Amino acid sequence: MNKNKRKSNVESPGVLKGKNLGPRRRNTCPSPQDITRALQSPSSAPSASAASLDDLIQRCLNCFDSEGKTSSPRGTQLVHMTLMMHSWVVPSEAFAQKLLTLYKDCPSDKRGLRRTQIRHLARQWISQFPAVFEVDPHLEQTMGDLWALVRSDGGEEKHSQLIENSCLSPHLNISQAPSPSVKKRKVSLIFDHMEPDEMAEHLSYLEFKNFCNVSFLDYRSYVVRGSVRDNPALERSVMMCNGVSQWVQLMILSRHTAQQRAQVFTKFIHVAQKLRSLQNFNTLMAVTGGLCHSSISRLKDTSNLLPPDVTKALSEMTELLSSRSNYSNYRRVYNECTGFKVPILGVHLKDLISLNEALPDYIDEEKINLSKLQHLYSNINDLLALHSCTPPFEANKDLLHLLTLSLDLYYTEDEIYELSYAKEPKNPKVQVSRLATSKLVAEWGSGVTPRLDPDTISKHVKQMVDSIMKNYDHNQDGYISLEEFEKIAANFPFSFCTQETDREGQISREEITSYFMRGMSVCAKLGYNFNDAHNFHETTYKRPTFCDICRGFLWGVTKQGYHCKDCGINCHRHCRDLVGIECLKKHKNTTGSCPCTPAPDLRTKGNSWSASFLLHIQSAKHTLSSVSKKSLKLLFNIIIFSGQVRKRRPFCV
């Protein structure tokens, strides 16, 4: 498939695209225009342009009186800015060492007031930014030395107690999102029954929760390093943004007819409109980016069935989020919003990067550029201030569990395009769909894929299964209607596998758990059944061998392909990622030892089919939704070619 046809109609902020790009420090390096605009951003309280570290500390100390109160709002802001932002230019340990030295070397005539001011500054630092000390053991040690020195002062119990209390007292996190509402009412966990407003509110809850977990340390880490790697808070935000965008695409592509796809498309337009009214711009960007993705915009049969008001609404959303003039439309609307709002993090991170790149850390070699710190502080503090806003909605825990697991899914671009072309095959006579709109900001963290560990997936599955049983197990016997379960499973774009049940028309809690654990291990790219992945080794074959995936010959003199030492499957290097079968040998001697993946009974007598063939069929069922028709046909040809089918009889999976 031609890769130039796979490009998204969205643009990642801060990521420059083009050919023959030279080496650069990071892929978010700003343009001169970005730097100019960032410097034009208002600063709430401009300070003197430069000062040495000693002078800056002295200014902060002079803001305190003998009772620990700051002299003015300007002084309060200077202290807060210095404590938060100094680490951008000097290590926090060096800052703490300066305080320790000042405390030791205080002149005797100024010792009383100066030491009191140092203690108050240290107390504010510890109480307002405790996370800094948790991640830096050297800083903690230096502050411990200062604390020991304070305690050694005779008659200083009162002041030492101030630091002791600030160190030991639990700190309230004002940035925590509100807890989900604990409502007794039953809710529908079926996608078609969910109202767009309800869906938008629950997506906003998850988004706001992730946003509130991003601290000033996370912003600094991203700006300095240019990556979300080893930055869990920002990585979760990126994963959700990309997950929502992908979920929108897959929910549309999961429908069989153009009319059904148009209905889902329209529903997500209404979700986007509600997100706009909630002032949740980050999730709005993700939803709109999914609707504008080229895998969706190419669906001409679908777009022809959309009402004019839907296409008009989409055009308005893309215009709002357009990257033209440095996202001027978004910035204007965002600045007009008051109260609860969720910004597009990619845009604001780009501003921080622009400032960091444009302004030097020091002026005249030894003086800290306070103008840079003030501009960075103003931008970051505005983002952190939003954490204390109260969302204008409540969330239901059961719906949150459902959406959380739905967004854990991950498909590659190739898989999504394959599904798109399967729904509406390519027609060279058809022009570009009218859904192809102007470029907008969407996946600012493009390339960041879910890396959820098995424990997290298991937790999400358990939470969702509990919610399903709570709302649909009316008899509380551990079973729900199979019909209702199939409707709930439709929240996930494609069926994971064929589920067998031990009761006619019903499915148990254990079977539901097994279904989702099996499916999530595939779709979240964690490997089949987590610990049961293939044990592949590059192998030199001494006899003619064929690939078990594409049926092609393994050519070459040495190391022609890969061989699984556990189940014996052979494949090409380029076919290894297409292997959609569990490592079967690990289950031959087990009879349901893993509650999430019960092993089939291979000892049934009188069966005309071989046990090996049954295993192949079971694995084919498991991967039917994620394997193309061509690949699936090849899989069946392999089974027939290997002599495992006794008769050429039709069969269904």
Image: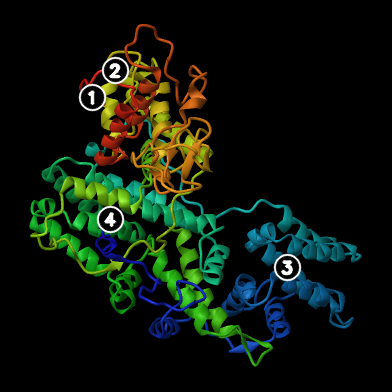
Q: For the residues marked 3 and 4, what is the alpha-carbon distance in whole angstroms?
A: 48 Å
**Which numbered circle lies on residue 122?**
3
Q: Position of residue 455 (x, y in %)?
A: 53, 38
Residue kind at label 4, given as amino acid type = Gly
Closer-to-camera residue (515/36):
515
Report the residue that reaches farthest toward the top: 606
- Using a 10 Å C-alpha cutoff, classify the residue at mark 3 as few (fewer than 14 neighbours), some (14 to 19) or many (20 or more): many
Distance from Cα at disc 1 to Cα at disc 2 = 16 Å
Tag 4: Cα neighbours inside 10 Å, few (<14), some, or many (≥20)? Answer: many
**Residue at screen point 69% across, 86% down:** 52
- Asked if residue 372 lies left or right of residue 340, the reply is right
Residue identified by numbered label 2: 646
Q: Earlier in the sequence, mark 1 or mark 2?
A: 2
- Foreground mark, 3 or 4, reads 4
| 44 lies above or below 15 | below
State the SS at label 3: helix
Residue occupied by mark 4? 290
**Image position, residue 250 (x, y; %):** 27, 46
The quarter of the displayed image where residue 478 is located: top left
Residue 334, above or below 421: below
Q: Which residue is mark 1?
A: 652
Quarter of the figure with the C terminus: top left
Is residue 190 in sight in this rendering? Answer: no
Q: Amino acid at mark 1?
A: Cys
Instruction: Kindly identify the residue that appears in the image at 62 percent across and 88 percent down.
Output: 50
Q: Is residue 299 visible?
A: yes
Cα–Cα gap, marks 1 and 3:
72 Å
Between 647 and 435, which is closer to the camera in this rendering? 647
